[in-house]
Image (spheres, rainbow, N blue to C red):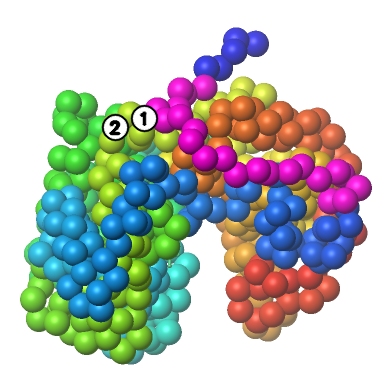
Amino acid sequence: MKKIKPPVEPFRIKTVERIKITSRKEREEILKRAGFNVFNIPAEKVFIDLLTDSGTSAMSDNQWAGLMVGDESYAGAKNFFHLQETVRNIFCFKHVIPTHQGRAAERILFETLLKKGDSVPSNIHFDTTRANIEVRGAQAVDLVIDEAYDPDSEHPFKGNMDVDKLKKFIEKKGRERIPLVMLTITNNSGGGQPVSVKNIKEVSQVCKKYRIPLFFDACRFAENAYFVKKRENGYEKRSVLEIAQEIFSYGQGATMSAKKDALVNIGGFVALDDDLLAEKLKNQLIISEGFPTYGGLAGRDLEAIARGLEEVLEEDYLEYRINQVAYLARLLDEAGIPIFKPVGGHAVYLLADRFLPHIPRHQYPGWALTVALYREAGIRAVEIGGVMFAKKDRKTGREVFPKLELVRLAIPRRVYTSAHLDYVAEAIIGIYKNRDKIRGLRIVRESPYLRHFTAQLEEI
Ligand SMILES: *Cc1c(COP(=O)(O)O)cnc(C)c1O
């Protein structure tokens, strides 16, 4: 087999954090104690942690240096003005309101805008976005194109919204019950798939026609802009900064979790143009997050976010980032491992039902694969399948399973080297060869909401 070349890291390593591999016997014990739930495993007992790309980025020396110039004044800290200037330059929205993370940005926005019975269409809402909408008695509606649910379709922009579905939905529901439309870039819950500028433009035209504001869930805006540069006609020669600016020019605001494309471990913000709405959001912010120039963060955090937003648009970084994820996907694909295609921006998704065809859905093949990954190799991944998303039928009590049974291998930014990814690929290929030995599981204890975080299971 031809050797697949890994991307070269556009940085060198100045500080290291030790990671230790445990023995298989130790991991057997740890799994039992954790109720076969990888969320219950102490992080120190994980060798390669691919649970999430959120808040797990490595900061640069420039960001760490920024922490030392944190201005911890209660009001008007200089780092706020640096953040405001940076966000205005990239997002081109007038008001910048910091929050402690993305879901806090969502909460102040929806608490202000939504009434019971309202609807908010998106391509696919992220879980916290959906929860913050539903808790207001409103409806979170997913209107992504059909290709998004087909793991074999090579559509280059599987995060696109279906514009016809959007028009029909607005006509049916009435514009006065739709306070905003959202677009998640990249589309996290749909595999980190990008949205094209063409699609964003079309969605914005529909919104304009019905006078509904368009907001972006912008957590991975830089990765989205990079995909546009690589895949969309007419954008090859534009800088990712220019592409990001164009994308945001079609909307009226954005919510952001800085734990993704701002390359920090905590933080978020809302950015928007509307003066009156900004005033209302700031009033909400003061109740729970803090004064509008710090929003639940320290001055040093604001500085790290500002610097991270500048670094994330460096094109050598983005090229390495996207190619690192693609590199792991190629190693797996060429070995015949079933994965979701094309690969998205922040993670590789294994198709667990094809990986483990001998395990029926009600014995949770995705979950079984996360257990096998930890047991055999000390790797932590997350199931996005039956345990996370099955709904109980009210009448029969039987579980109704989501379309896809996935295991996500999320790649933290600037954290693991290509050698680590080689290790991950080899481990998965080894597990695939012995997949017949993997057993399904049953749930012995669960909670009514978000059961995957706390469920206790046993192997069958
Ligand atoms: C992570 C994420 C959020 C929520 O952000 P937090 O910082 O975790 O609160 C919202 N939307 C998307 C698309 C995300 O990936």
* Residue 131: percent from left, percent from top: 45, 76
Label 1 sits on what residue type?
Answer: Glu
Q: Which residues are magenta?
A: 6-27
Tell me the quadrant of ligand 1. bottom left
Mark 1 and mark 2 in contact (Cβ < 8 Å)?
yes
Q: Quadrant of the C terminus?
A: bottom right
Q: Position of residue 187 (x, y in %)?
A: 39, 52
Relative to residue 27, is residue 113 drawn left or right?
A: left
Label 2: few (<14), some or many (≥20) within 10 Å?
some
Numbered badge on residue 315: 2
Q: Judge by depth and name the residue closer to the eye, 211 or 71.
A: 71
Q: Residues within 10 Å of mark 1 (few under 14, many from 20)?
A: some
Q: Residue at x 47, y 67 (%)?
A: 127
**Residue at image x 30%, y 75%?**
295
- Mark 2 to mark 1 CA distance (whole Å): 6 Å
Circle 1: element type:
helix
